[in-house]
Image: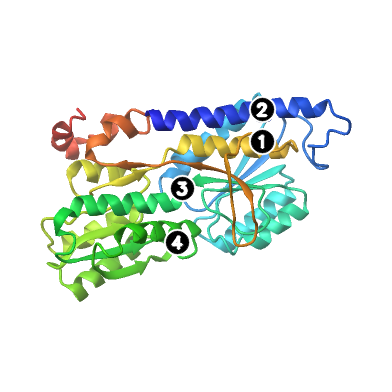
Amino acid sequence: MNTRMRRVAVAVAAGAMAVSLAACGSAKEAGDKTKESGAATGDAIKVGLLLPENQTARYEKFDKPLIEKTVKELTGGKGEVVYANAKQDATTQNSQVDTMITNKVNVLIVDAVDSKAIAGSVKKAKEAGIPVVAYDRLAEGPIDAYTSFDNEEVGKVQGKALLEALGDKAKDGQIVMMNGSVTDPNAKLFKSGAHSVLDGKVNVGKEYDTVEWKPENANTNMAAALSALGKDKVIGVYSANDGMAGGIITALKAAGVSPLPPVTGQDAELAGVQRIVAGEQFMSVYKPYAPEAEAAAKMAVALAKGEKVTGVTTSTVDSPTTKGVPSVLIPVVSLTKANIKDTVVKDGVYTADEICTDKYAAACATAGLK
């Protein structure tokens, strides 16, 4: 783990210790005023975990198991995580909240499909005495805590990387901006951050808000952009994540664009990392999921027991409906061919063997991964 990420992990762990110590002290006070009336009284808590979709590899591979692991560690193996995935359907996710309420979970961790559409369900949970941790996306409604990455910084990192790749040719043609879904509040922040870096320094020929973040929709949008602008006029592509970058690169190849222009990404998905090694994708944004998942689990366990989360959280954020939400924001890293070995490989996200399949063996050797 690099130094920056190690500092984050230590800070989160220290925060959890502070919560534990604060809880011990409060138990000695008359009436235990930090406890909520409906809170669990021991470690046998039930944590509801609602994730938004299963198209992006991170949710099933990293977020879910990391949260489950931390809940078990914090409760001596007695805590239970009840899991559901909405598969990108906001109506389904609202029904899943109802089910969690019926099952009397002690706390909810919710990564919203649609930050606005979930607000009514968050309110229902609160009325049932169930606190809610907004995870990765800032859900609307009366949430109790929030953890994510500095999402505007993600967009800035992507924008800076694209400018670096374009160099002194940044205004020699046009770029295409492929933003995420309008239902995801993070997409708005990525977009804002990228524009703050790119505006005035590049010519944006076409810009899209990609429905449901789907790679096939990005592919369709990119094909349309190439048709409208001319394939020889596109010098770079801002892609908000790796999944869409894959669809974009497929469209570029299908149109006969060669060499490929620099394409950004996010999430450090295995396919994205392999494209970076192969020189097809310029960069991704590596978001260390472990500290984010651990922070969510620690806040959830504290809330389930009726304890404060201020020992874990490091800042506050405002949603459109709730001000001053206690929060943990995790820093991000620009991932390029130059630092794959010192980031995702060193941190154990992927092994060199996972990245360097036969198809990528030669490129891996050149990049020093084998």
Residue 109 spot, x, y in % from top left: 61, 46
Give the Cα separation between the discs numbered 4 and 3: 12 Å
Label number found at residue 75: 2
Give SS at disc 2: loop
Q: Is residue 133 left or right of residue 4?
A: right
Mark nearest the camera among 4 and 1 is: 4
Left or right side of 146 for 34: right
Residue denoted by label 3: 150
Q: Are marks 4 and 1 in contact (CB under 8 Å)?
A: no
Going from N to C along the chain, the mark reached first, 3 or 1, is 3
Question: Most extreme residue toward the right, as rendered?
Answer: 30
* Mark in front: 3 vs 2: 3
Q: Which residue is drawn at 14% across and 64% down?
A: 172
Label 1 environment density (alpha carbons within 10 Å; few <14, some 14–19, many ≥20): many
* Tag in front: 3 or 1: 3
Q: Residue 238, percent across and down? A: 29, 58
Q: Is mark 1 on a helix, strand or loop?
A: helix
For label 1, the residue is 301
Residue drawn at point x = 40 percent, y = 32 percent: 4
